[in-house]
Amino acid sequence: MAIKVDPEKCINCGACELGCSFYRDEVFTTMSASVMMYREEKKNYFGIMLKREDDMILGRPEGVEIQKEGEESDSDAGASAKPILLREPCDNCKNAMCVRFCPTGSLIEVD
Amino acid sequence: MDYLYTEYYLVVDLATGEAEEVELEEEFVQENVGGAKLNMALYEEHKDGEPIVLGTGPFTSTLVPGGCLGVITAKSPVTGDVAHAPITWNAGAELKLSGYSFVVIKNKADNPTYLWLHDEIADFVDASALWGKDVWETVDVIRDEQGEDRIQLLSIGKAGENKLSTAQVMNNYWGDGDRFGFGALFGEKNLKAVAVRGMGELDIDDAEAFIEKTEELLGKVKSALPGQSGLDAIDFADIPDDAKAALKSQLHRVEADFNNPFAYKFFLKYREDPSVMKSTDVEEPGVLISDPMGLAALLKAGVPADAVGEVFEKAFKLGLNPAAVASKLSGKDKDAALAELDSLAESSEAEKFEATFSPFAPSSDRMEAAYIAGICPVLASKVEALNAEMFAELMSIGTGMDFDADAFKM
């Protein structure tokens, strides 16, 4: 089971952050999720980052980019990625809460 | 309070520069629940200090759909009575996660100040250099100063500094639900901004049952909003079709409040092709229409639809409530309207009206409960399942205490 990101559908509500954090710690917080929102607010530029074992998915409005471990990204999403680097990677849990609570289908589970 | 709330709330005295942490006791929550209702109890308790109370509901910062809401409670210069304005977007959620579910701000600072609330710490920061700066500059400076892009800000611009009843408490760069002139109260108190960022955690009594019920509720919410977002969703604002068509030519992307499935906010781009999805060198490409009723008021006043974005931007930078000044812009073209806003930020007065809750959201019989629960009132107006009975059941599960529907009435 893995998570697929469709950034065009994202409305930047952050339910995925809450859901993933709850899965890990059974509390409401945004700080322990493997998935994280980013936003350049004045430009309305926003999307989703998902940390995986060996890489990171940058779900940017203009498309999805896979950033390998140790690689630099010149995108703004890459520049915003630093806080997520300290977090646990996605463990590909089944019936993932980030997917269940995403209201738009921006995150979906795939085999 | 062990569940759904933080352990403490904060009482800030701007005159002395002291902040006191007070335990949020179970009995107090049992009696006053949260949001506007608990704010009101704190307002009464600290009335002598002419307080502004910032508060959250039990479901703010939780997975309950629409759980974004913070509430500002204070005596309105517009109505003359104590009133409640919504804090949408992300500031309510961050306030609670900063460690303080409620903040009472009393008295007046000697010099311009901003409050920086984070990690159960309250800092008083000198804002002398920010006084006179517009709202957008203020947001940029404070985020830069504190080193975090996700800091959420309630701040004022020139209109608030000038203590006008048309001034609004702004939410980051954008307008929000303050129709009550609370921006003038910030100005009176020499309070330029309240900045919040939260790394806290909220416990739940019966977490499994709470999540099960919340997920069931999310299903009902999604069923009530089939395909609704942005301009197409704000039918409550009564925007004419020709104006909608003009706005659609500038439409970029829709956005939601924190954990709000209803993306009723949308961004207009007018300094860049709205089809551009990349982040470009254009630093200020447009404006977030965060306030559909304010948009409707401007259009009704005769501001041309293709100019409305820039009028919003200017009003937001000045910290003016667009709905309150719309009539002053009647019949003006874009340049004249923008010039008029400069004058209005120096001197203007909001038309009096009577209301306890802000007309930011459509009136509904669920509004009161939403303001107490910490649920976006715009969403609640659309979804019947977001009602007092549902909130009482969820709160009982989440806290292990007993609440009934009457608890979610003022």
Image (cartoon, coloured by chain):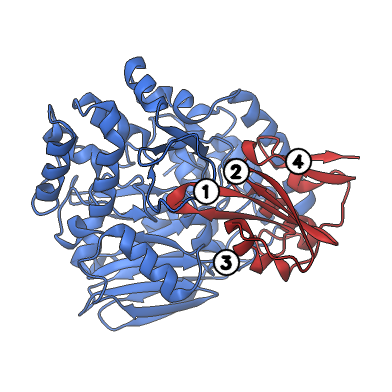
Marks 2 & 1, CB-CB < 8 Å contact: yes
Residue A100 location (% of width, % of height):
76, 41
Q: Secondary structure at mark 3?
A: loop
Q: Residue at x 17, y 42 (%)?
A: B338
Q: Tell me where residue B289 sits by quadrant.
A: top left
- Label 2 marks a residue whose chain is A
CA neighbours of label 3 inside 10 A, class few (<14), some (14 to 19), many (20+):
many
Marks 4 & 2, CB-CB < 8 Å contact: no
Residue at which label 3 appears: B6
Q: Amino acid at mark 1?
A: Tyr
Front tag of 4 and 1: 1
Residue at which label 2 appears: A61
Which quadrant would the C terminus of chain A be assigned to in this image?
Answer: top right
Q: Is residue B56 visible?
A: no
What separation in Å lies between label 2 and label 1 (alpha carbons)? 7 Å
Q: Is residue B257 visible?
A: yes
Indicate the chain coloured blue by its letter: B
What separation in Å lies between label 4 and label 1 (alpha carbons)? 24 Å
CA neighbours of label 1 inside 10 A, class few (<14), some (14 to 19), many (20+):
many
Q: Tell me where residue B146 sits by quadrant.
A: bottom left
Q: Secondary structure at mark 1?
A: strand
- Label 4 marks a residue whose chain is A
Residue B88 location (% of width, % of height):
45, 47
Q: Is residue B162 left or right of residue B135?
A: left
Which quadrant would the N terminus of chain A be assigned to in this image?
Answer: top right
Q: Is residue A53 above or below residue A14?
A: below
* Tag 4 and tag 2 share a subunit: yes
* Tag 3 and tag 1 share a subunit: no
Q: Amino acid at mark 3?
A: Thr
